[in-house]
Amino acid sequence: MNTGPSDQNDANESSLAQSEHPSPVPAPAPEVLPDPAPLSSQSRSSRSPWSTRVSLLLVAALVGGLAGHFASNSNSSSNGVTINAVSSAPGAATLPNGMSIPKLVDRVQPSVVSIDVKGNGEEDQGTGMIISSNGLVVTNNHVIAAAVQSGTITVTRTGSTKSIPAVLVGTNPIDDVALIKVEGVSNLPTVTFGNSNSLVVGDAVVAIGNALGLAAGTPTVTSGIVSALGRTVTAGTTNSTETLDNMIQTDAAINPGNSGGPLLDSSGNVVGMNTAVAGTLADGTNAQNIGFAIPAATIETLLKSLRAGESVVNHGAFIGVEITSMNAELQAEYGFTISTGAVVMSVISGTGAAAGGVKQGDIIVGINGTAITSAQDVSSVISALKPGDVITLRIVRGTKHLTLHVTLGSAPKSG
């Protein structure tokens, strides 16, 4: 998925199509976050001349303002300038629950690491979250993809400049989640997972990560809100794509290098893993403030198999629906008769779901005899299947309980 950190590789990132809830307006194309190396002289020289000009104009305006200020005081009776100063600290930004962002960051940052991966002639950088005191770290699969066959993985803890070797434990390319283990460590602080299923649009969130690979050990912090829930995102590069369901959309600034880092609720609990950012539309229009995170609930369902050292083979099976987990808000708004399941937000034409009779508003409650209580359950079941397999869906449509048969297709490829 990740083409590497250099400017040249970043330029090869393809425009990617996002499948959203039904809308007549084309959605911006998300792309999996490339994980860049620190800025080089080449990257500096490639900046737009417009950005340089704007910077110069700002400096000129600032200098002019200061010159005017001093000139206006030169005629005062004091023949000097009076500078007012205070010794109190600046006020901290606070979240709606009263938690200050500096306190939240101080508490969580020790559990966040920067990741550097070398392999196949590439060097990628990203972020990870410590989930066990003996060094297990969860991150995105595309962050460590270059080292799957052969290569090296190192991590740098927050507040440190020392790189520590790590080994790959398990990978899941379908859901873009991987588990690595830092070697020779103990008593590490860990993140706490929150309840991503209880998120609602408008909830405050904070993102932490190795944005732009600016400096390992000193993560970047941004804040915003949950902008939307249940997004289906097709993301990738010219060489690889993936379709991720039930993603959290946020306007907290997410940049290359944030991949694998935490999206936190206002209590400092991890509700998502930052994974992708919207790219450009077909007409070249740039998307603004649209990033995507994998829900914490999805990650938790995958950890057991990842800890066992399993590596999921990406068969690319695809039902052809956009889904989101049932929650109290949806149930109240649409009058659904059940409180759990995977709600079908839209059906993609020409897919197995469309041919099998699945409709918008259906609630998937079972697949091949396995109970479905959330969108994550659907992904878990489908990940073990392949294109051409026929599945039996149990759905609830209004007050009716129906059984449908759907032939799985292949996941769509972007651009």
Image (tube, grey):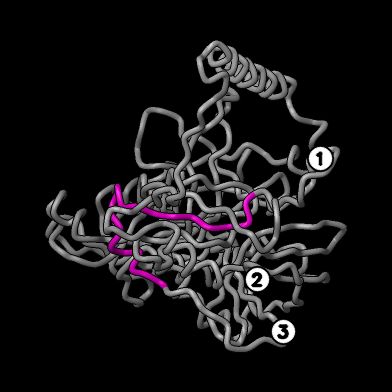
Residue tagged 3: 183
Which label's residue is closer to the chain start, 1 or 2? Answer: 1
Residue 353 in the figure: left or right of residue 152? left
Label 2 belongs to which residue?
157
How many numbered marks does the figure carry?
3
The residue tagged with tag 2: helix, strand or loop?
strand
Q: Is residue 232 visible?
A: no
Question: Quarter of the image holding residue 390?
Answer: bottom left
Q: Could you give the CA–CA distance between mark 3 and mark 2, rounded to whole angstroms?
A: 13 Å
In the picture, measured across the screen, residue 167 lies left or right of residue 306, that is right
Q: Of the residues shown, which amino acid type is indicated by label 3?
A: Glu
What amino acid type should be assigned to the residue bearing mark 2? Arg
Residue visible at 64% across and 53% down? 257
**Secondary structure category for the residue under label 1:** helix
How far from the left and from the top, in percent, is residue 216?
Answer: 70, 60
The span shown in magenta is 193-211
The furthest residue to the front? 77
Which numbered disc, 1 or 3, marks the residue closer to the eye?
3
First in sequence, mark 1 or 3: give its number.
1
Where residue 148 appears, as percent x and y from the top left, is 75, 70
Tell me how far mark 1 sits from mark 3, CA to CA: 33 Å
Q: Nearer the viewer, residue 292 or 353?
A: 292
What's the residue type where badge 1 is placed?
A: Gln
**Residue 266 included in the magenta stretch of the image:** no
Residue that mark 1 sits on: 8
Local crowd size for mark 1, using a 10 Å CA cut-off: few (<14), some (14–19), many (≥20): few
- The residue shown at (62%, 50%) is 33
Q: Is residue 136 above or below residue 336?
A: below
Position of residue 60 relative to residue 348, above or below, is above
